[in-house]
Image: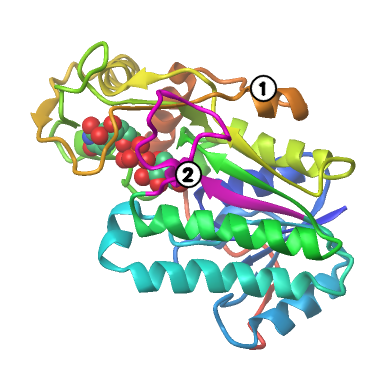
Amino acid sequence: MTVLVTGGAGYIGSHIVRALQQRAEHVVVADNLQSGDAGRIGDATLVQIDLTGPASASALSEVLNAYDVTAVVHMAALKRADESVGSPLKYYRENISMLANVLRAMDGTAADKFVFSSSAAVYGNPPEDRVTELTPAMPINPYGSSKLAGEWLVRDVARASGIRAVSLRYFNVAGAGAHDLADPVPMNLVTRAIDALERGTVPQIFGDDYPTPDGTGVRDYVHVEDLANAHIAALVYLEHGQRYSVFNVGTGEGASVREVLRELRDVSGDDFEPQIAARRPGDPASVVADASMIREHFDWAPQHDLRSMIASAWAASQHPASLHPVSSKVESDTS
Ligand code: WQD
């Protein structure tokens, strides 16, 4: 099976590429390298392409045919929920157009299995703590809305064509599968906290007056390696599964900000005292997955606990990835 991973040079995408390579699958990565790093993809074939371009669908179609691709994992997207609030047009245009171009490119090729990178952000501020796939999706920012709209597009294309697809709603991803695969952007709790320590300051807690056991926000953290393996399990599921389905990807366990920072204190040996800051607008108190569906239908269960996530993220931050020469064939975009 040859799998094409869009956005495969990014943080999560490169973990999926590595998991596929460990299963001796041939991997093609389609990435514009704007935020990704070609050094993260090993011996995968790299096709540098702008998936928003008008000719990208035909260019990508040629790539799918040239490498006999049978499955596509679509990771390429803008993903900053906070940034999306001020740039809705950019988020809808880029995220939906890239997705539409990839789906269009698959038409008429051997690529008939599709895994879509969606997000728990589609739920917004869920009314109940434990979120199932049937919890009403009410996104509260354009990023989450663009992911929900993307799910509808995938669903409708799967229903109208021979493509079989799943949408995976990621909860809070953390950790690193190897020292050279750290999350390079300090955008979320764990990476921001590590970045603060490296800058000689202390992590911030956005509000400690939430209706949670210790007053700080509770989330469902999932190790990026477990998340990558959920994509492998999804590809196997698509060999025989439903034409289209949606799965939460989480552990089903909640952890508070204080619990995460306590793990960071332990693994870093830095006995820091976090700074209490104001609540971040739009943050729900608690969002934890009901992950029973994915466990029921996929051969998958999370293997890593919170300590493993924080320890691996910390270890990777202490061994900044050395720059690798591009070790794979790079084809320029023909669009
Ligand atoms: C987690 C908790 C904060 C930073 C993100 C993405 C979302 C989706 C899921 C991609 C919250 C608190 C954070 C800090 C803090 N990912 N916090 N201090 O907002 O749950 O959602 O992951 O699809 O799009 O936004 O993640 O890591 O920003 O926040 O106290 O410096 O940590 O209030 O309770 P979030 P996060």
* Residue under label 2: 137
Q: x, y (%) of residue 321?
A: 46, 47
Residue depicted at x 42% and y 52%: 144
Q: Quadrant of ligand 1?
A: top left
Residue 167 or residue 51, whichever sits in front: 167
Position of residue 88 relative to residue 208, above or below, is below
Of circles 2 and 1, the one toward us is: 2
Dot 1: element: loop
Residue at 55 percent of width and 49 percent of height: 118
Q: Which residue is mark 1?
A: 301
Spatial CA span between label 2 and label 1: 24 Å
**In the visual, does 277 lie left or right of 230?**
left
Residue extending furthest top? 213
Badge count: 2
Q: Which comes sooner in the sequence, label 2 or label 1? A: 2
The amino acid beneath tag 2 is Ala
> Label 1 is placed on what type of residue?
Ala
Q: Quadrant of the C terminus?
A: bottom right
Query: Which percent across, then down, holds residue 311?
Result: 42, 23
Q: Residues within 10 Å of mark 1 (few under 14, many from 20)?
A: some
Q: Magenta stretch? A: 114-139
